[in-house]
Amino acid sequence: MAIRLTPTELTDQERALQAEVRAFCDEFLPRGSFEPGLGMSSGPSKELSRELGKRGWLGMALPTRYGGSDRSTVDRLVVVEELLRRGAPLEQHWTADRQSGIVINRFGTEEQKQRFLPDIAAGELCFCIGMSEPDSGSDLASVKTRATPTDGGWLLNGTKIWTSNAHFADWMICLCRTADADTPHQGLSQLLVDMHADGISINPIPLLDGTADFSEVVFNDVFVADDLLLGEPGNGWQQVTSELSFERAGPERWITPIIIVENFLREYADHLSEAALDFLGHTIARWWGLRQISLAAARMIDEGKAPALQAAMGKDMGTEFEQEVIAELQQLVDIEPSLTSDSQFSRLLARAVLVAPSWAIRGGTNEILKGIIAKGLR
Ligand SMILES: Cc1cc2nc3c(=O)[nH]c(=O)nc-3n(C[C@H](O)[C@H](O)[C@H](O)COP(=O)(O)OP(=O)(O)OC[C@H]3O[C@@H](n4cnc5c(N)ncnc54)[C@H](O)[C@@H]3O)c2cc1C
């Protein structure tokens, strides 16, 4: 089997949307008015999330009857590409918009759709991803967090780790064991867990740059009502793997350093060396190729296909590109990047140097993605 990608361009309608989002960014997020973030790790802003919700730019692929816009995956890509390029603070709605809403729409009950989807599309709800555990990351099926049946619902016990945005999330979609089974992939389910419920402790984990975007989340006899079971009991593995496919194909996997390259150009435009020109040429060419992979994968989703291999390839190549751009920029400039510098380029580069290793781990490590690609090509 081969990995096929059909070259594609934005239509006139999609370009018009792109122009609209650019104008919005200039109005609401003018350069210099805020400290830009690095890709999807950009901090939360309820105000921005609500503005995007009002414009129909969240939950874009969700049905209109649940507050969505019935638009395409490519439309969402156009919107998020512009926002990520600006370094906009997107974390309040990021996970809900990218995957939780889609998963609820696909597997949830009518009651769950009515309860959660309109608020997701309005930018009111923050979701986090409860997959990884201290002894279960790549080997996700080995999760030990367990929900045992009780009167009217489940009692949840266990520990999740590396949970991005847990400290301000409203809800988690939690993968847990609800039954003993012959193989680890059976007996798993997904629960919608209220992050403010009794029995939940959230312990932030600091990153090298001093931020603490992710946490350990401990469940101690947390009650989850029956109507918060998402999908079929025991179908958790099928649901979680479908959720992961939404995590991997997007521009967030290759766009992170672009804002740093733009700032480099702003500060060094007057004295670009030959090496800098070479760097810019090959970086932009690679960036454009990776963008084509995301765009082609998004078109495939809109045609009802499931581009899991293309998404894995895009993320593997994209995060390698991101790390290489940071390393090459460090070689090019004769400065010690600093988080407290007056130069925005220096601040962004300093943060990137500290957190870049995590780009090839979050959402599945590059070794795991290469394994998926190799198996798919057999
Ligand atoms: C910034 C960041 C944010 C994150 N956010 C979340 C989140 O919101 N929710 C969540 O659930 N998780 C989150 N994670 C966790 C992330 O998904 C896991 O760290 C990742 O899946 C790897 O799991 P692990 O850390 O247990 O490493 P391990 O699985 O223990 O892997 C250790 C090393 O062994 C390699 N390895 C393991 N198995 C194989 C194999 N079969 N073949 C080849 N090599 C292998 C890996 O590639 C890696 O290099 C986040 C991680 C980071 C860094």
Image (cartoon, helix red, strand yellow):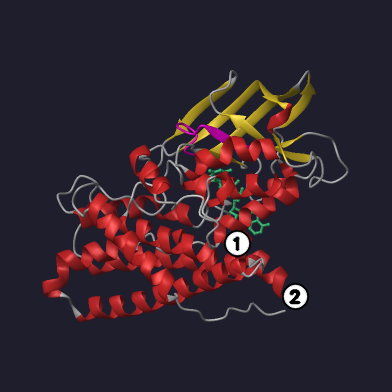
220 with respect to 39 (left or right): right
178 with respect to 78 (left or right): right
Secondary element under disc 2, as helix, strand or loop, is loop
Secondary element under disc 1, as helix, strand or loop, is helix
- Amino acid type at image mark 1: Glu
Percent position of residue 243, x then y: 63, 51
Give the label, 2 or 1, closer to the camera.
2
Query: Which residue: 35% across, 46% down?
Result: 89
Percent position of residue 71, x then y: 52, 60
In the rendered view, would you say 92 is above or below 286?
above
The reply to whether dot 2 and dot 1 touch (C-beta < 8 Å) is: no
Could you give the CA–CA distance between mark 2 and mark 1, rounded to whole angstroms? Answer: 17 Å
Quadrant of the drawing holding the N terminus? bottom right
Query: Which residue: 61% across, 42% down?
Result: 132
Percent position of residue 345, x then y: 22, 57
For the question of whether residue 236 can be seen, the reply is yes
In the rendered view, would you say 202 is above or below 238?
above
- Residue 209 magenta: no
For the question of whether residue 163 can be seen, the reply is no
- Amino acid type at image mark 2: Arg
The outermost residue toward the front is: 65
Mark 2 CB in 8 Å range of ligand 1? no
Q: Which residues are magenta?
A: 164-174
The quarter of the picture where residue 17 lies is bottom left
Q: Which residue is mark 2?
A: 378
Q: Which residue is mark 1?
A: 367
Mark 1 CB in 8 Å range of ligand 1? yes
Quadrant of the drawing holding the C terminus? bottom right
- Residue 169 magenta: yes
Q: Residues within 10 Å of mark 2 (few under 14, many from 20)?
A: few
